[in-house]
Image (tube, helix red, strand yellow):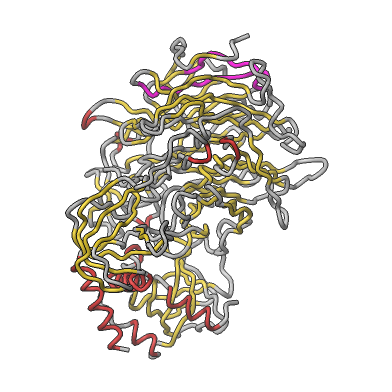
Amino acid sequence: MAGPRRRSEAMRDAAFVFKGTVQKVPGATMASVPVDDTTAIVRVDQILRAPEALAGLTGDVITVKLTERARPKRGEQAIFHTTGWLVGDGIAVRSLGHTDVDSAAASRAAHPRDPVAAKAARDLERHRDDADLVVTGRVTAVRMPAEPPRRAATVKARAPISEHAPAWREAIIDVHDVHKGAGSPKRLVVRFPSSTDVRWAAVPKFHPGQRGVFLLHAVAGRGVGKTRYEALHRDDFRPLDPLAQATKASRAEKQAR
Amino acid sequence: MAARRRSSSARARRPRRRRAGARNVLIVNMIPKSLSGEEHQDSEPTIAVNPANSRQIVGSAFTPDPAEGPNAPIYVSLDGGLTWTLNSIVPSTVADGSATADITVAFGSASNVLYAGIIRYPFPGDRTRLNVLRTTDVQSAEIMQVLVDRIGRGVDQPYVQADTIRRGAGKGKDRVYVGSNDFNAVAGNTATIDRSLDGGGARPAFKAVRIESRATAGQDGPTVRPAVHADGTVYAVFHAWRTFDDHTGAGTADIVVVRDDAAATGARPFTSLVDPGDGKAGIRVVQGARFNFNGYLGLQRTGGDVSIAVDPRDSDVVYVAYNADEDSVYALHVLRSTDRGRTWSRDLHHLRDALNPALAINTAGTVGLLYQQLRGAGAAQQWVTRVETTTNGTMWSALTLARTPAQIPRRQFDPYLGDYDRLMAVGKDFYGVFSASNVPRKANFPNGVVYQRNANFTTSTLLDVDGTTPVHPSIDPFFFKIAG
């Protein structure tokens, strides 16, 4: 059983957060769910944060796997912080914890009108917090890595050939503004995968002329004091407007706290 | 006796073929009804039927967790494939949605334990991360247990098979074999089988066995496929790279079969077959098969497919399928050995521009071959997915599962259909899975199809959960069963 701190962290990570009313315990809405004391039928009263696939469940009854010690009882309304479990002829989710409907956490979560946008804004905010360097800039050139893999003169020298190979490229970025991170670089080199393999397809593919916000993560540099950056996440490059909107939404949410 | 080695450019006589008569065929689109709005490219499917309970079937594809949680889903059916549920219990997550970079699944033949070999997300740079997983309850909310977790220089295309010991010492234990291209191997001998002799045990030990005995082009290809017989015979076929051009992606490969007669329990596993040509372990069934790792057939990338199946009635009998570039054709070949892999037939079957071969043999000795063939041109181009069966290797009976548009939908990533699909046999029945365009049109499925997701076959339109909002076509996994 997770401790209070871990549970609290897990609840913050929850992708699907909703206000719901317990209809039946034990119970399940899907025939394939093994029913026991930890499974409950819960009516979704209001969705607060959701991935797109679960955003249309308001008014539906779903199965919730209750993992917390203090479980809500029949008729009780609560804010459920959940993650996915089963998707079939119905939906079942795993509860990471629940809070009272009138708790501070509930009031914080209750503001967004669009639960999908709320989740996207939360995810982007976290991604921005994780970034080492956030800059506005323009891609001026894309090139092969400065030190391409050597040919197969020696087996050990060549990078493995696999369908998942990233096919690295380097984007040269002229920096206009630094929003986060130390220093004020005028120009950056950012490594990114040009591969269209399933692993890399969603990662931004840079081309000259692109303008926007780059959320970059530092990797070990080859030279002393020279930091190198990679773009490996779908949100590592963002057009200006959505980021500004996310920032605005984030500020509004913080003010509401 | 037929020649042991053959040139990859050799042509066989066109095999006789007849259309299948009325057969008991079930084809099911595996996307659940509650995901009717999804438009993801759910390519590269596999399935595993539980031999101890054939109503329990697990599938996989490049389907991300719809709930955007930290675990990737498997498809689970408890009613023999009629309906499917996604269960997100595979520990693998990436920003684009929790899925895997590769996944295959297999049940122990009598243990009810499901094993999975995956490339787990995230992994650092180009160093792919192998996980071997298991669960004893495919419907449980418990995350699959990690048995092997390896990165090093990276591992590619884990392909898992398992067999439960039926009698004698070790009865009830699962022998698990995971083929992969393991870049941690020294000197480029990367074709590898990770094997455990007690996969269901408390702490199963896995040993990485390098099955490549010859000099390579720096490495082997990604396809390393084991096939297990209940008598302890274990075969594996792999795409043994001999030349490779880094710039063009073109190369040549040997199609090599190795065998172990004692379930790979000995000190020198997979060395039972020795090629008299060079005295090394592994018979070179074909030498110099050309491939291009950067190649495409339609929107599907190519690079050298292989498949293998052993006759459950007689472990002396083994079939191999492989692909080779021949002029402008991506040719699929099927060969057979009746002497435990020592000598091989000429082509029993030869198909033009067909890929994703998957072989299986049922308990009646009927051989099944699943493949996907590109036909036509332009807007009329189609992927034709078929199963052909034979009882003698010469007369093939064809069953068309799907004829789907080859340009709809657009490609979201590689692979478009998948670098593999799957066929297996339980008893006399064949079970399989393929990925294809999900445009709901009856003509696309001449032997019928069942959609769980909302679809209007009159207007050829997919519909969202609300039953009215149109949804764009995408690639979906299709389960099928052909009753024996």
Q: Is residue B423 magenta?
A: no
Q: Is residue B339 magenta?
A: yes
Q: List x then y, in percent, for residue B418.
A: 41, 40
Q: Is A39 rendered above or below residue B38? A: below
Say which of B382 and B294 sits in front. B294
Say which of A216 and B50 sits in front. A216
Q: Considering the image in quadrants, where does the N terminus of chain B appear?
A: top right
Q: Is residue A34 left or right of residue A193?
A: right
Q: Is residue A1 left or right of residue B348?
A: right
Question: In which quadrant of the rendered view does residue A232 lie?
Answer: bottom left
Say if residue A89 shows up in the picture. Answer: no
Q: List x then y, in percent, for residue A79.
A: 41, 81
Say which of A68 and B288 sits in front. B288
Residue drawn where x is 49% and y is 46% of the image: B81
Q: List x then y, in percent, for residue B180.
A: 56, 40
**Magenta stretch bounds:** B329-349
Q: Is residue B387 left or right of residue A121?
A: right
Say if residue A33 shows up in the picture. Answer: yes
Residue drawn where x is 67% and y is 26% of the image: B281
Question: In which quadrant of the rendered view does residue B194 lie?
Answer: top right
Say which of A195 and B330 sits in front. A195
Question: In which quadrant of the rendered view does residue B98 lie?
Answer: bottom left
Residue drawn where x is 37% and y is 64% of the image: A217
Q: Is A9 rendered above or below residue B433? A: below
